[in-house]
Image (tube, rainbow, N blue to C red):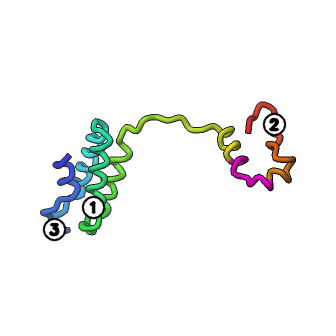
């Protein structure tokens, strides 16, 4: 990862000597590394890049690209998305009790057959 970061930042290079192809290779390399590291390593890399962002404004685009690539490539665990019934129930629970009471004594609304609140 340190070599990838050097490719992205190219600290010794002036703006004229900065090589975008080398930076792109560094970004892709970082992404490949993130597929095989622990979350703590990915997070440390992202935090480091965030700290560099305030100091390397002439490399801003590449630092942001590297952060996005790190997060896009990290293998976050799969989680199922809640279904509409969960969202409907949560929305009904968010309605104040006094309004629910006016909507039929605090009972849940009638839903089409087979749908739960």
Q: Dot 1 corresponds to which residue?
A: 51
Q: Earlier in the sequence, mark 1 or mark 3?
A: 3
Secondary element under disc 3, as helix, strand or loop, is: loop
For the residues bearing labels 2 and 1, Cβ distance under 8 angstroms: no
Q: Quadrant of residue 38?
A: top left
Locate residue 103, reporting x and y percent. Answer: 85, 50
Locate residue 50, reporting x and y percent. Answer: 30, 59
Locate residue 60, reporting x and y percent. Answer: 30, 64
Q: Earlier in the sequence, mark 2 or mark 1?
A: 1
Which residue is nearer to you in this view: 51 or 27?
51
Q: Earlier in the sequence, mark 3 or mark 2?
A: 3
Q: Residue furthest left?
A: 12
| Vertical side of 29 occupied by 23: above or below | below
Secondary element under disc 1, as helix, strand or loop, is: helix
* Residue at figure coordinates x 20%, y 68% from the top left: 15
Q: Which residues are magenta?
A: 91-99
* Residue at figure coordinates x 21%, y 58% from the top left: 9
* Residue at figure coordinates x 12%, y 63% from the top left: 12
In the rendered image, which quarter contains the C terminus? top right
Secondary element under disc 2, as helix, strand or loop, is: loop
Residue 95 is one of the magenta-drawn residues: yes
Locate residue 104, reporting x and y percent. Answer: 87, 47
Find residue 14 and name its label: 3
Marks 3/2: CA distance? 65 Å
């Amino acid at each position: 990862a340190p070599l990838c970061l050097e490719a992205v930042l190219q600290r010794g290079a002036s703006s004229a000597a900065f090589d975008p192809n080398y930076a792109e290779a560094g970004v892709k390399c970082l992404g490949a590394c993130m597929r095989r590291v622990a979350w703590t390593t990915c997070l440390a890399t992202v935090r480091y890049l965030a700290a560099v962002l305030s100091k390397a404004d002439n490399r801003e685009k590449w630092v942001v690209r590297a952060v996005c690539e790190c997060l896009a490539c990290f293998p976050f665990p799969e989680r199922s998305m809640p279904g509409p019934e969960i969202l409907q129930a949560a929305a009904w629970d968010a309605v104040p009790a006094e309004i629910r009471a006016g909507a039929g004594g605090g009972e849940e609304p009638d839903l089409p057959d087979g749908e739960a609140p």
